[in-house]
Amino acid sequence: MTHQVMHELVQKYRSTFIGYWKDFHKHPEPSHKEVRTAAKVAEILKNLGMEVKEGVGGTGVVGLLRGTQTGPTIALRADMDALQIKEETGCDFASMNEGVMHACGHDSHTAMLLGAAHVLSELKAHIRGNIKFIFQPAEEDSPVGGAPAMIKDGVLEDPKVEAIFGIHVWPTLETGVMGIKEGVMSAASDRLKMSILGKSTHAATPEFGVDAVVITSQVISALQTIISRNVSPLDSAVITFGKIEGGSRYNIVADRVDLDGTVRTFNPDTRKLVAEKISQIAEGVSSSMGGDCIVDYKWGYPPTMNDPSVTQIAKETILETLGENGLYEISMPNPGGEDFAFFSEKVPAAFAWLGCRPKGIPPENFPKLHNNKFLPDEEALPIGVTYLCQVALAALGALSK
């Protein structure tokens, strides 16, 4: 497939997938409620003549494009859900659903994958094997996510997927650049809830009670020693509490404090170690101060792992699509969580970042992901569509040998 033919097909459908993007952005739906989005996706895929399954893992949709020649099966994945954020982009296709916004770019992911579906459907005669188009719900529903339910419903089987690819718009990268690396691409993202239990009394007579607030302060400080004294300086981990609630009145010693936070790790062994140490230290400190502690550690998204051989296919595709200046070799993984990781545990995978910051705008002046003003550069979408098409064809070719 020549670059000129691919370019012409992507341009042919440009207004179509840009229209999808603006429509999805205007009608965002939060995790597990992507009903309108899923229905539209399914309708488009059916009109393209694909075999379509709906209700996969909840509101997930899967389209199967069978090539005219027998061969392997690869998958392309996009997420569909939005965030519960009030939009302030000021664009003319802003969210009509109050308090819900596509602040993470999943609308563009869905639109780009639909664009790729249009293009690849026209290239059916050149396809050796099958391409699955996976539209996944609930990526933002940490620590559960939407991928496990789709996997349980057999999304990677019948026919069996041999490699999977995904992209994410990335505002720190300029439009025209894509980033990727082998190995760990993003962190494991676990949820940590904790309750520190004490005994209430009058604030003027603290000796008759057990102050849960004081215990909590010691627990929080002690937990940070896990990072500084149990995790190798050559590795990394994060323990962050974003929410603390406790006490009922200014002059009463609190008998309970509830904490809610997250743990991020890159190494599976470190992940296990940190979880064990959190329970040991929190319970030990609480007990030593006369209180008690209940730890609720929920295992969430694992690290996203990029398979070396599949990632090499992705790198070569980026170079062919954007040239040498278009490939950004990522040195360090991102500490954010990404539930594409569940797919990467099951089949060889490659996840890439798609630059979406307009040229000429400094990184510090462009809104980041999950910001109420975030809106990817429209010019990034054709690049994403081209990449998805090219990497699918390249992977099928490589796996057919």
Image: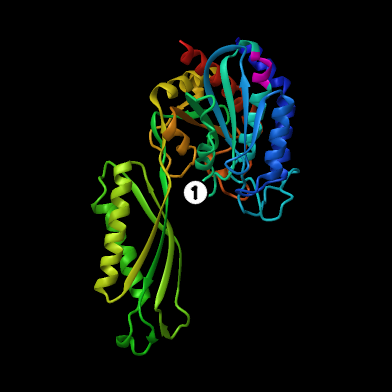
* Residue 12 visible somewhere in the drawing: yes
331 to 291, vertically: above or below: above
> Residue under circle 1?
144
Q: Is residue 127 left or right of residue 399?
A: right
**Residue type, label 1:** Val
Q: Residue at x 58, y 22 (%)?
A: 131
- Say which quadrant the N terminus sits in: top right
Q: Residue at x 51, y 30 (%)?
A: 156
Residue 281 included in the magenta stretch of the image: no
Whole-percent x, y for residue 263 in the image = 39, 52
Q: Main secondary structure of the magenta part?
A: helix
Q: Residue at x 66, y 54 (%)?
A: 86
Q: Is residue 226 left or right of residue 398?
A: left
Whole-percent x, y for residue 307 in the image = 40, 27
369, 313: nearer the viewer: 313
Q: Residue at x 52, y 16 (%)?
A: 396
Neighbour class for label 1 at 10 Å: few (<14), some, many (≥20)? some
- Say which quadrant the C terminus sits in: top left
Segment colored magenta: 119-124
* Residue 360 visible somewhere in the drawing: no
